[in-house]
Amino acid sequence: MSTETNPMRFGSGQAVRRLEDESLLAGAGRFTDDVTLPNQTFLAFVRSPYPHARLASLDTASAAAMPGVLRILTGAELHGAGVKPLPGAAGFTRADGTDCAAPPRHVLALDRVRFVGEPVAAVIAETAREARDAAEAVMVDYEALPMVVDLAGATADGAPLVWDEATGNIAAEMRHGSREATSAAFAKASHVVALDVVNQRVVALTIEPRSVLADFDAASERITLRMSTQMPSGVRNSVCDAIGLPKEQVRVVVGDVGGGFGMKTSAYPEDIVVAFAARAVRRPVKWVADRSEEFLSSWHGRDIEAHAELALDARGKILGLRIRTLANVGAYAGGTGVVIQLLIGPWVQTSVYDIQTIDFHFHAVLTHTAPTGAYRGAGRPEAIYTIERLMDEAARQTGIDRIELRRRNFIQPAQMPYTNPMQQTYDTGKFESVMDQALKLADWQGFDARAAQSKRQGRLRGLGIATFLEWTGGNVFEERVTVSVQADGVIEVFSAVNAMGQGIATTLAQLAVDAFGVPIEKVRIVLGDTDRGDGFGSAGSRSLFTGGSAVRIGAERTIDKAKALAAQELEVAPADLSYAGGVFKVAGTDLQLDLFTLAGRQPDRQIFVDSTSAVAGPTWPNGCHICEVEIDPPTGDVSVLAYASVNDVGRVVNPMIVRGQLEGGAVQGIGQALCERVVYDIETGQPLTGSLMDYAAPRADIIASMFKTEMDQSTPCLNNPLGVKGVGELGTIGATPAVVNAVADALARNGMAGLTPRLDMPLTPARMWALMQPGP
């Protein structure tokens, strides 16, 4: 059946093939580096080889005389031109009530460098090679200063300070809950379980590195930035603020984006420098990061150490939760890095469990490393990893079955809407039901037989579980769309959310099909152009529930406007008209008017609506993820044999895309659990994982069998008209605790329960082998 006769084959609930894929698979994608402009120049950065040093002198004379060099920019020049530092963590304070203490992050270093890879100067030249060669010829005299790159060293007495005003290297801290009430709960507990948990530093590792092409128009004095970003409007605003331009002077255009994962949400120093450079040389300027630059200077993720304690009564009911954390936010305390660890992660720290008594004390710590920021999950993976490790450890220490322990502590459907101790309100959730479905999907009851078979082969088999939820939304719940019904038979929808490989254009098109009832071929989704409209963009798994809801509401408003126009054309009251499948019909007659014909009769041959709408609040997707692993004792190798999950993501628009998001996210979470880790040398401050030769990224074969992934749609979200919940980060959040809990289970089942508190990611073969060796 053709889409002309049944357009709803391509509406919500259908596994529509991604509209984006045909051009990408054919090699016809249009990424920033695919664009070459007339008279284009290239930019290369001079980067610090020191983790901490004073810039004694900077000599550009020899480099400036090299072939092709047009201009060399320094921090002093940009500072003198009024270029502002990037904004810090406004609104956060230290223990004494003073503002967050951190050095200003100049777009090119001024006076000091504070991490290896910090940009010091920028060379603009006719070719990329000439720019790189000249960058190597810039002479910088560095005076090395004391440095520290790890949390233990940074918080030790007498540690070198990243910023003199940040005593103890504490940039900011927050407390949540009640120390007194939590202490009382612990005093009456039958069981107290304590665990030290580490979430190691990782890189986002997008396939496409950061890239910027700035085009300067001399006639209008306007800059057009073509770049790989998730949030075009936000980046434009940051560039304008830093350089001192009105918003009308800068346009950001985004084509295809080869992955974002949160790392491409905000403006970087490099973006601002490239924009400034285009104005300086009055020609287009392109910069594309190489892989080593990305490892050195893009946002890193995670890097948090926690001491967590759980108080339980004799039956295993949780009485209180106490957590102390140190979060390594790097050399500059950016707003994203601080808010993720001090506020957003804590929002979900109690997860799906009915815990009201908490005592949290979280610290943002400065070190001489690259700053941290958003990475898939952004604070929620760290929080959920902590509570899920605690739950399994509590089960082992109390002797209560881990499934039963969860049942006794789940928030029940009758408690919805439920407000957790961080004053976050969950609208819906059936956490026990989701877990029961996952247990069946994973064949939990049949595990003993599989474990026995592994044991006969000399391997240790373990079964891990994580039951959890997350917050989604990016904390901005409004979005803008424009809808244009055009006379040529196309409905064009512009949205300010952005594509980055997640298939959002297809999903938005399906929602337009739902509303207009036309074939999907008649829908054109346009994204990534600040001249077409402003909006928050894509972050925090918000693209569908805010952007999609905006499309739904915008489409409905367009149909309402079209109905009024059709009523005028047909000389009837709007109430006498019905709409379906792109046609207005007059009740009780054979009169009708096609939507596109109606558009052609308008003065500008279109029906246009500019619509801004908001949803009522965040969504709370949740799930149960179950992982099965084998450990090979002679080598320490951990193999993921099976992975099953049931996920409550509300109403599902495209099950194929949702499944891809869940499973792709899980691969990233498994990667953190088993192999990924950014390493800085404590003695020298040098990054030891500066390329894919040194950093172990997960591969497609990280799981030995296919995922079993199901969605539970029985509890649609009540905060948006679609009933959908965010999905982009859920798999990453559930995977790390599920994998590590499975490894802990394998050890405990084989007489090594005493080792489980010592498990730290990544669980590499070398680490696992060393852990399992007999003690002295």
Image (cartoon, helix red, strand yellow):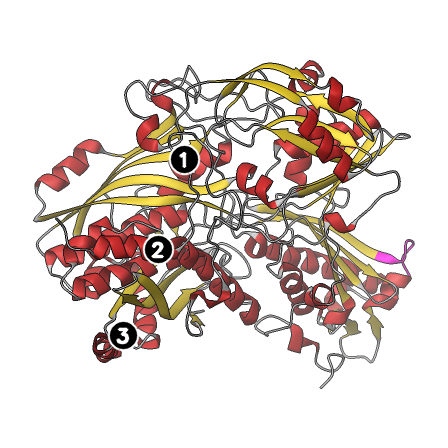
Mark 1 → mark 2, Cα distance in angstroms: 19 Å
Please report whichever mark, 1 or 2, sits nearer to the chain's N-terminal start: 1
Element at label 3: helix
Q: Which residue is mark 2?
A: 764
Q: Amino acid at mark 1?
A: Asp
**Disc number placed over residue 444 in the picture, else none:** 3
Where is residue 248? Give x, y as percent.
78, 32
Q: Residue at (39%, 68%) from the top-left corner?
A: 645
Q: Earlier in the sequence, mark 2 or mark 3?
A: 3
Q: Nearer the viewer, mark 2 or mark 3?
A: 2
Marks 2,3: beta carbons within 8 A:
no
Point 46% across, 33% down: residue? 686
Cα–Cα gap, marks 2 and 3: 26 Å
Image height check: is 490 above or below 52? below
Is there any visible trace of residue 353 in the rendered image? no
Closer to us: 166 or 488: 166
Residue 660 image offset from top left, x and y in percent: 53, 66
Q: Quadrant of residue 291?
A: top right
Observer-nearest residue: 687 or 528? 687
Is 1 left, or right, of 539 in this rendering?
right
Q: Amino acid at mark 2?
A: Thr
Q: Is residue 582 left or right of residue 257?
A: right
**Residues at marks 3 and 1, CA–CA distance in whole angstroms:** 42 Å
SS at circle 2: loop
Magenta stretch: includes residue 565: no
Residue 77 horizontal side relative to residue 583, left or right:
left
Label 3: how many residues lie within 10 Å, few (<14), some (14-19) or many (20+)?
A: some
Whichever of callouts 3 and 1 sits on the residue coming sooner in the sequence is 3
Image point (58%, 49%), residue name: 260
The stretch of residues the image draws in magenta is 601-606
Residue under circle 1? 681
